[in-house]
Each structure stands twice: as structure tokens, then as C-alpha cells.
Amino acid sequence: MNKPLRRIAVFCGLLVLALLVRDNWLQYVKADHLAEHDMNRRVPIERYAQPRGDIIVDGNPITGSKKVDGDDFKYKRTYKNGPMWSPVTGFASQRIGATQIESIEDRILTGNDDRLFFRRSLDMLTGKKKEGGNVVTTLNAAAQKAAYNGLKGRGKGAVAAIDPQTGAILALASTPSYDPSSFAGNTNKEAETFTKLDKDPDKPLLNRALRETYPPGSTFKVVTAAAALEHGLYTDIDSKTRSPLPWVMPNTRTELKNEGPIPCKNASLRQALRVSCNTVFGKIGSDLGKDKMLETAEEFGFNEEQFVPVRSNASVFPKDMDKPQTALSSIGQFETAATPLQMAMVTAAIANDGTLMEPYMVNSLQAPSLDVVEKHSPKEMGKPLSKENAQKLQDMMQTVVEDGTGTKAKIPGVTVGGKTGTAQHGLNNSKNPYAWFISYAKTDSGSPVAVAVVVEDSDAARDDISGGGLAAPIARDVMKAVLDSKK
């Protein structure tokens, strides 16, 4: 063979080798990735080739499937009370894709999970059609309804409710909301519906209970109180604190103001929480210093994302602050920001005698036969405060509801603890503030529910906005719904 032919043969051999390497790379190394890639049209076609399994609340499905004629996709998703449940379910759309539980548990819902292999193989042998499994949630239908109905007509807002003893999420509501059924299919009209929702300045697609961080305002004072007790700055909640009035923040000439003429000079921790003294809790934060405040905040879950299994944004307690900024952060201002879920976790830890349980909202996964494929076991997340100090803080929060700013959260015959908050909003506090309320209800067998509510009511008169006025009645109704469901 002459030299030119030999070169051509070698070159062709290299091309064949490269083709074989590439082919094996695609078939073996990248096979799973390509098979599951959203741009692979076979993936959504298979996803909607049969009815999806259901998402279950209180033993009843809140989802369904509807047969579609004349399309590659044989079935599309349907939702019962979609706007109320969308913060829990997310959506499954033939055109857009899937989010939240619909996405995270997609393999169970479509029947493609590896744990269902035996069932799929048996169905193939018997000729039975493929079926999806179910996702059983921890949600309480009555509590979710109370939360959603309480928020409706209030502008933007969110509610998160937790069982303090287990971490199970009982309610997760967000407004304004959307109906996932309205764009579940593959038509141009449904695509336009999604685009309109996506561009809406009020962000109805945003899950505010998990993904929006708000300045927590005075509700954060319970964390500051916990820090004061845990670090030994104060031990007696009824003794006077070292809190002059006026109080000038360190290294400044700026007085930290209280909201109105309230009795805050050297007020006890109980009194300071009851009337929400900025000066007392700002000075506590300054006296403790940023490191101790940061330690306590992080033990409650701040600065860490939560997965329930849907991801919740990390709430923020700043790490780099000077003394005045530490004072402001300790009353829920400056750069402190929290999701409603985070403030429900704070409340739950206090109600559970200092033990913080890991939040979750999927109780179990079921095969199509209803056999349990996976069962969640409650997990302890940490102990941000001792039992003794938690009970002191409970005592303080109960005073807030009995004889303070949270009286609208009272439930006859039930011990309720709470804390109001009105957080600044907008440049120089130019917009209507956020109204917060955190609370728990307690019975002889412990606390079955802790709640966080935040309301941004753009239509309310500014002077009428308060955590005790707007948010506390919603929290009360959610707690009452949980208590009634346990009778």
C-alpha cells in the first residue's frame, strides 16, 4: 500500500474509533441523563401516557387526571381547589414542566420509580396497564382551608403551620395564588395563561410560605429573648432589665425608638415582650453581641436552606454587623429576613420545650397497590434552648395573648402563646408594613400546632395594619381548625 493510501486508512480508522467511543459514551455513560432530560420529548410523553398517581391529604386525593383526545399526551393533570393547594402540590404541565411535589416525586407519581420495578414487571406479565403511585402528605385540610380563606382578600401573604412535636407541616398557604389546572395541558391558550401568571407583578406563582423572605419585625424578639436566657444575660423574666429610656445605640447619636408611649424603661422580659419594646430587645442584642445572637439564630435554622422536601429559601441573620446593626437585627430589622416556614419553626421549637424538629410535608410514598414504599420518620433538628428557658418563653408569649398585643388569637379553654410583629417595608418605610403573627396552641398532651402568618395588605389604611389586627385572627382560625380535627 502506498503512503497516501496508508494515511487515509489510518485516518478512517481513527474516525471509526471516535464514532465507537462516542456511541458507547452516549449509550452507557449518558444514557440515564438523556433518557430523563426534559428536552427529550419521550420523557413528557411517557409522563402523561397514563393517569398520574395522586397527592393525598387526610386520606383524600387533591389531584386527578383527565383523558385528552388527539394528542401525544394521553392524560393531563387536574387539581381540586387548585389555588388553595398549589403551594403544596406545585404544578405538572405538559407544556411547561413540573414543580414542587409534582416534580420531586415525579417517578413515584408516574410509576417509574425503581422501587416499583417488581410491580411494573408483574403488570407487564398480566397485561395490566401501568399505574402511578401516591404521595401522602402531612397536611391538615381544615387548617389549610382556614389559612387560605384567612389570606384571601388581604393582598399578598402566607401561612405556615407545623406540628411542633413531629415537624409535620399542617398548612402551607400563599396568596395571591393560581390554579395549576389552568395550564396543565399543551394548548397555546394554556401556554398564554402561564405566561400571564409568570409576568404578573404580584407573582401568584411564587410560594411565599417557602420562597419569600420578609423582615420579621418584632416576631424576631422571641429569638432575642431566647438568646438572652440561653447566654445568661437574664434569668428571671419578671425582674427589671438594664434598659434605659431613651436608649442611644452604641457608637451613634441615634435613639432607638419604641412604637408609641409604652412602659419600656428597665422593663422585665415579660413586660417588654407583652408591649413589644424595641429598646429592651435592641439593647439585649447589643449587650450579647453579634456572635451570640448569630449562634442562637442559626440554632433555630437561620442561614440554612430547608428541604421539606420542596426547597425553602434560607432565612437570614446577618453575619457581619457593627453594634448598632446588631441592635436593629435583634428586633427583626436591618438585614434580618425570614420565611413564614422559618418563623413557624422558631415558634414550634419554643412550644416543644426547646426541641426543634425537622419540618416535612410528605408522610409516605405509596405503590399503586397502596403498599407503603417509603415512610418518613420524624427527626430532631436541634435544641436551640433548654426546656427550662423554653417554658419561660412560653410563659412570656402567653402573656402577650392574654394581656398584650395578641389578644385576637385567644381560643376559649386553650392555652395560646404568641407574638405580634409589624415590619418596615419599602425605602424609608414608605410602603405599607408587613403584619406578622406567630403563635402556638397547647393542650394537656403538648402543643399540636405552631403557626406563622404574614400579611401584606396593600388596601388597608396604614394605621390599621398590625400583626395583632390582621394576622392574629388568621393564626387563631388555623390553630382552632387543627384542635377541632383532633377531637
Image (tube, rainbow, N blue to C red):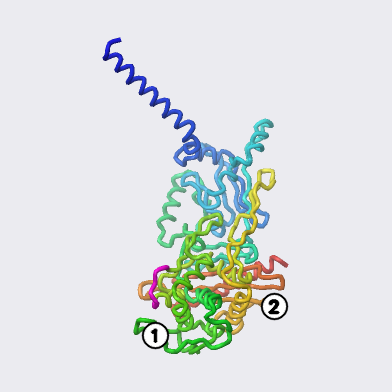
Question: What percent of the width, then of the height, locates residue 256?
Answer: 41, 83
Does dot 1 land on a helix, a strand or a loop? loop
Q: Which residue is mark 1?
A: 248
Q: Which residue is mark 2?
A: 413
Question: What percent of the width, then of the height, locates residue 247?
Answer: 42, 86
- Is residue 468 in view? no
Classed neighbour count for the residue bearing mark 1: other residues with Cα under 10 Å, few (<14), some (14–19), many (≥20): some
Classed neighbour count for the residue bearing mark 2: other residues with Cα under 10 Å, few (<14), some (14–19), many (≥20): few
Taking 298 as reference, is 118 left or right? Answer: right
> Which segment is the magenta one?
319-324
Question: What percent of the width, then of the height, locates residue 140?
Answer: 64, 61
- Indicate the quadrant where residue 427 lies: bottom left
Camera-side residue of 305 and 121? 305
Q: CA distance from mark 2 to mark 1?
A: 43 Å
The amino acid beneath tag 1 is Val
The amino acid beneath tag 2 is Gly
Camera-side residue of 285 and 429? 285
Taking 45 as reference, is 165 left or right? Answer: right
